[in-house]
């Protein structure tokens, strides 16, 4: 059986926290996208590489991929954004994305997916529910202004386990 590269989960969690704080949540620099029309952010630290790729504004699906020694080892997909009734409300969207970045900057190694379970940022409430762990998870986050949901998004992901060859 070929050897499969399996990252140390604690190292992966630590890297994810650093990467997420340095990219979208930290207003990281955009790089040339692999897919035209997408926005992409990248963070590299030694053998680790993180890329966040998304498209759109009011509704912006995307994917994060972590590579270790050049091989993809972890991924997360997300989809959602500003609730449909508020598409076109630029001020509301800017405020919601400011709140989202503030919440995502509070990512930690025990939940290295998105933001904390619950946090107030000004008069906005960010909430995040997740099931699973770094190896396989799914979750939902939302931002409310007073008592009205203005942003909602689902996400899922986990480790990438490739097919391996066996000797006959």
Image (cartoon, rainbow, N blue to C red):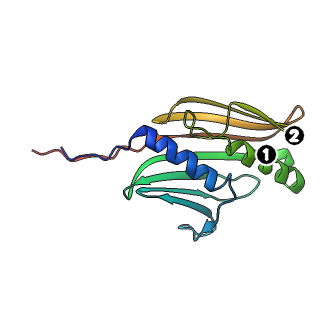
Element carrying mark 1: helix
Does residue 112 sit above or below 91 in this rendering? above
Does residue 158 sit above or below 40 in this rendering? above
Lower position in the chain sequence, tag 2 or tag 1: 1
Res 148 quadrant in image: top right
Which quadrant is the N terminus positioned in? top left
State yes or no: discs 2 and 1 in contact (Cβ < 8 Å). Answer: yes
Residue at x 62%, y 55% (from the top left corner)? 22
Which quadrant is the C terminus positioned in? top left
Which numbered disc covers residue 122? Answer: 2
Does residue 109 sit above or below 76 in this rendering? above
Q: Number of labelled discs?
A: 2
Residue at x 68%, y 51% (from the top left corner)? 25
Which numbered disc covers residue 30? Answer: none
Q: Is residue 87 visible?
A: no
Seen as rendered, the residue at the extreme left is 168
Does residue 137 sit above or below 71 in this rendering? above
- Where residue 143 sits: x, y (%)? 78, 38
Q: Nearer the viewer, residue 167 or 113?
A: 113
Which residue position is annotated with label 1? 99
Left/right of residue 151 with respect to residue 160 in the rendered view:
right
Left/right of residue 109 with respect to residue 87 in the rendered view:
left
- Where residue 47 sits: x, y (%)? 40, 56
């Amino acid at each position: 059986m070929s050897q499969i590269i399996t990252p140390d989960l604690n190292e992966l969690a630590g890297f994810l926290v650093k990467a997420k704080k340095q990219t979208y949540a930290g207003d990281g620099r955009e790089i040339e996208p692999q897919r035209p029309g997408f926005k992409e952010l990248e963070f590299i630290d030694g053998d680790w590489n993180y890329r966040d790729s998304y498209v759109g504004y009011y509704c912006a699906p995307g994917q994060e991929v972590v590579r270790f020694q050049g091989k993809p080892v972890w991924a997360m997909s997300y989809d959602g954004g500003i609730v449909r009734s508020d598409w076109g409300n630029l001020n509301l969207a800017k405020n919601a994305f400011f709140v989202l970045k503030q919440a995502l900057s509070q990512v930690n190694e025990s939940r290295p997916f998105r933001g904390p379970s619950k946090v107030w940022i000004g008069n906005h409430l960010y909430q995040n529910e997740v099931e699973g762990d770094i190896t396989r998870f799914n979750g939902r986050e939302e931002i409310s202004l007073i008592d009205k949901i203005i942003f909602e998004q689902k996400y899922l992901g986990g480790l990438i386990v490739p097919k391996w060859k066996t000797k006959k």
